[in-house]
């Protein structure tokens, strides 16, 4: 009976700690690196960031706040400028289940992402929506970020 209780406690500790680990691992600032697209046939395509978007940074704070600063090219000058339409500092994040996060505001329910960490400094924000571009069917895409 004692061994069974210890086993149950160990399982409970492990399942709670893995969710805490992914929540803790996400906290910090991340710089955009590009997109990896997954074709339905199993191939992947890695796309470099568009000009200036490599300066874009997202920040997950311990208190559940989320900030996004995105950059784009000013068509007139060719310089990198902040994309005011895509930049936000009033968002929040929460872990819904192990590896699934919701990024939302007070006005909307948000967007769910599967988030994984191939290594300590890399984060993939995976959008599971299927889509077609140039007659190629994609099963999902991963937005790739490096911790800064």
Image (cartoon, rainbow, N blue to C red):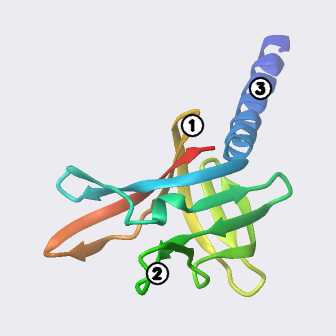
User: In the rendered image, which residue does mark 1 sit on?
Assistant: 121
User: In the rendered image, which residue does mark 3 sit on?
Assistant: 8
The image shows residue 50, relative to residue 62, as above or below, that is: below
For the residue carrying disc 3, how many other residues have a C-alpha within 10 Å: few (<14), some (14-19), or many (20+)? few
Residue at disc 3, secondary structure: helix
The answer to which image quadrant residue 146 occupies is top right
The image shows residue 3, relative to residue 118, as above or below, that is: above
Image quadrant where one finds the C terminus = top right
At 81% from the left and 25% from the top, the residue drawn is 9
Residue at disc 2, secondary structure: loop
Residue at disc 1, secondary structure: loop
Please name whichever residue, 85 or 21, is drawn nearer the observer in this view of the structure: 85
Q: Earlier in the sequence, mark 3 or mark 2?
A: 3
User: In the rendered image, which residue does mark 2 sit on?
Assistant: 74
Residue 64 located left or right of residue 101:
right
At 42% from the left and 64% from the top, the residue drawn is 128
Q: Find residue 126 and report its horizontal and vertical position in percent.
A: 47, 58
Mark 1 vs mark 2: in front: 2
* Cα–Cα span, label 1 and label 3: 33 Å
For the residue carrying disc 1, how many other residues have a C-alpha within 10 Å: few (<14), some (14-19), or many (20+)? few
Q: Find residue 109 and report its horizontal and vertical position in percent.
A: 67, 80
Residue 44, numbered label? none
Please name whichever residue, 94 or 37, is drawn nearer the observer in this view of the structure: 37
Number of numbered callouts drawn: 3
Q: Find residue 145 and report its horizontal and vertical position in percent.
A: 52, 50
């Amino acid at each position: 009976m004692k061994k069974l209780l210890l086993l149950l406690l160990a399982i409970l500790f492990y399942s709670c700690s893995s969710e805490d680990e992914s929540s803790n691992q996400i906290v910090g600032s991340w710089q955009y690196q590009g997109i990896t697209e997954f074709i339905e046939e199993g191939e992947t395509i890695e796309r470099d960031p568009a000009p200036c978007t490599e300066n874009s940074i997202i920040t997950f704070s311990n208190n559940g706040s989320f900030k996004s600063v995105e950059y784009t090219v000013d068509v007139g000058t060719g310089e990198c400028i902040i994309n005011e339409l895509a930049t936000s500092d009033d968002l929040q994040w929460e872990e819904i289940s192990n590896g699934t996060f919701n990024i939302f505001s007070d006005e909307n329910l948000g967007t769910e992402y599967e988030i994984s960490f191939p290594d300590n400094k890399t984060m993939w924000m995976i959008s599971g929506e299927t889509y077609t571009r140039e007659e190629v069917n994609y099963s999902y895409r991963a937005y790739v970020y490096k911790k800064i």
